[in-house]
Image (spheres, rainbow, N blue to C red):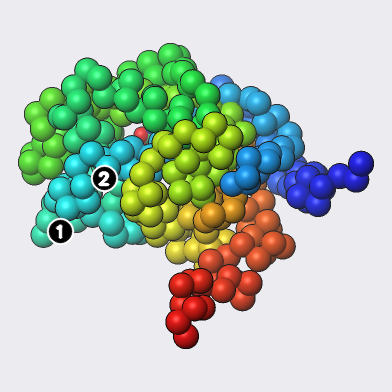
């Protein structure tokens, strides 16, 4: 049987970008420094549940910041966007993901995709759910991935031991009344959520779940309500790639999120979850091969939100 065009394309891109050896593995969390810089994988999962992979798509790595849109979605669902908005904004910060800096005037973190915003979101969940919070997060992530997930204890301990910058951010947030006093417990959950192990295929499946209005396309389980999916995708579009988000929106044009262990997930709404894994990062903390692969996939298949192939609302087709 002939190879599917998507599979052929993935293999071609893999060959092309395997030689891109610029960038560095993250070492500020000591355990992440053990990553193999040569690891490389790309996975696609469609909203009909078809999957395509190339490279070591079953290699596990920690989800890191890719956890952030998902916990933001949970907070929106549990508390409603109005309450969440009192604690965290939705503006791109134009600054590094770990900046110690809050929005002037409101003292909120700029958005939930940077560390300060994500810690705030986790603290809100912890304030409501206490000791049950982490299991709740793990369950939701597992529902999106379509299989039970677990934590990399070594990475979790490593980040807990060395996460002084995140501790400083948490204390700044307490100072401005953005999070409750038990910030240390909330931080612990944040470190655990970042240490959840996923594969490239898992991430593509989580992306496909978002593309599929919150329902895992293979198991049929509803992981997120449709209103939260809209918020998650919007914030990924404007803030998901940190201070590269503008350039990403221009070049690639789909909602996405990166993590310092080398993962990127991108969502083509109603069609596809795309994930890449390659631990060599640019100075902003985004995977270099991930950026190039997503960019080329988007231009080859017309995935950009404003590509001429994207025809807008079908509702308007009927009334115009
Ligand atoms: O809090 C941290 O610094 C990490 N657990 C997550 C940061 C991250 O993934 C930034 N991504 N590029």
Measured in 3D between alpha carbons, the distance from the residue under mark 1 to the one under mark 2, in whole angstroms, is 23 Å
Q: Is mark 1 within 8 Å of ligand 1?
A: no
Q: Quadrant of ligand 1?
A: top left
Mark sitting earlier along the chain (1/2): 2
Question: Which x, y percent locates residue 275?
Answer: 59, 42
SS label for mark 1:
loop
The reply, left or right, for residue 221 in relation to residue 96 is right
Is residue 280 something that shows in the picture?
no
Discs 1, 2 touching: Cβ within 8 Å: no
Q: Quadrant of residue 43?
A: top right
Position of 223 relative to 309 (above/below): above
The reply, left or right, for residue 266 in relation to residue 6 is left
Question: Which x, y percent locates residue 285?
Answer: 48, 44
Task: Give me the residue at 63% from left, 40% from top.
Answer: 49
Label total for image: 2
Task: Give me the residue at 39% from left, 19% from top.
Answer: 156
Work out which quarter of the rendered image holds the N terminus and state it: top right
Position of 223 relative to 10 (above/below): above
Label 2, on which residue? Answer: 76
Mark 2: few/some/many CA within 10 Å (<14, 14-19, 20+): many
Residue most extreme to the front: 318
The reply, left or right, for residue 13 in relation to residue 278 is right
Question: Which x, y percent locates residue 221?
Answer: 47, 33
The reply, left or right, for residue 253 in relation to residue 13 is left
Task: Give me the residue at 55% from left, 44% from top.
Answer: 208
SS label for mark 2:
helix
Label 1, on which residue? Answer: 104
Mark 1: few/some/many CA within 10 Å (<14, 14-19, 20+): few
Task: Give me the residue at 63% from left, 72% from top.
Answer: 309
Comparing labels 1 and 2, the label whose residue is closer to the camera: 2
Q: Nearer the viewer, residue 290 or 19?
A: 290
């Amino acid at each position: 049987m002939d190879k599917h065009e998507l599979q052929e394309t993935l293999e071609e891109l893999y060959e092309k970008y395997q030689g891109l050896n610029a960038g560095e593995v993250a070492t500020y969390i000591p355990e992440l420094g053990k990553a193999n810089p040569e690891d490389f994988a790309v996975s696609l999962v469609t909203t009909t549940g078809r999957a395509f992979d190339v490279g070591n798509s079953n290699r596990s790595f920690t989800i890191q910041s890719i956890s952030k849109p998902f916990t933001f979605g949970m907070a929106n669902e549990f508390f409603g966007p109005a309450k969440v908005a009192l604690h965290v904004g939705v503006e791109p910060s134009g600054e590094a993901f770990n900046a110690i800096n809050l929005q002037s005037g409101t003292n909120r973190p700029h958005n939930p995709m940077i560390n300060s915003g994500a810690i705030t979101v986790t603290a809100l969940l912890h304030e409501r759910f206490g000791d049950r919070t982490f299991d709740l997060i793990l369950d939701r992530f597992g529902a999106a991935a379509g299989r039970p997930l677990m934590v990399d204890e070594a990475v979790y301990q490593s980040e807990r031991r060395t996460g002084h910058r995140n501790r400083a951010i948490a204390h700044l947030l307490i100072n401005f009344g953005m999070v409750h006093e038990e910030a240390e417990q909330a931080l612990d959950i944040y470190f655990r959520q970042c240490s959840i192990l996923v594969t490239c295929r898992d991430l593509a499946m989580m992306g496909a779940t978002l593309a599929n209005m919150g329902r895992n396309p293979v198991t049929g389980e509803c992981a997120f309500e449709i209103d939260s999916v809209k918020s998650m995708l919007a914030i990924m579009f404007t803030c998901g790639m940190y201070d590269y988000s503008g350039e990403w929106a221009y070049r690639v044009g789909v909602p996405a999120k990166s993590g310092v262990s080398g993962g990127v997930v991108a969502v083509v709404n109603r069609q596809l979850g795309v994930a890449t894994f390659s631990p060599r990062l640019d100075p902003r903390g985004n995977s270099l091969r991930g950026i190039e692969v997503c960019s080329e996939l988007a231009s080859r298949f017309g995935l950009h939100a404003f590509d001429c192939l994207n025809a807008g609302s079908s509702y308007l087709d009927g009334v115009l």
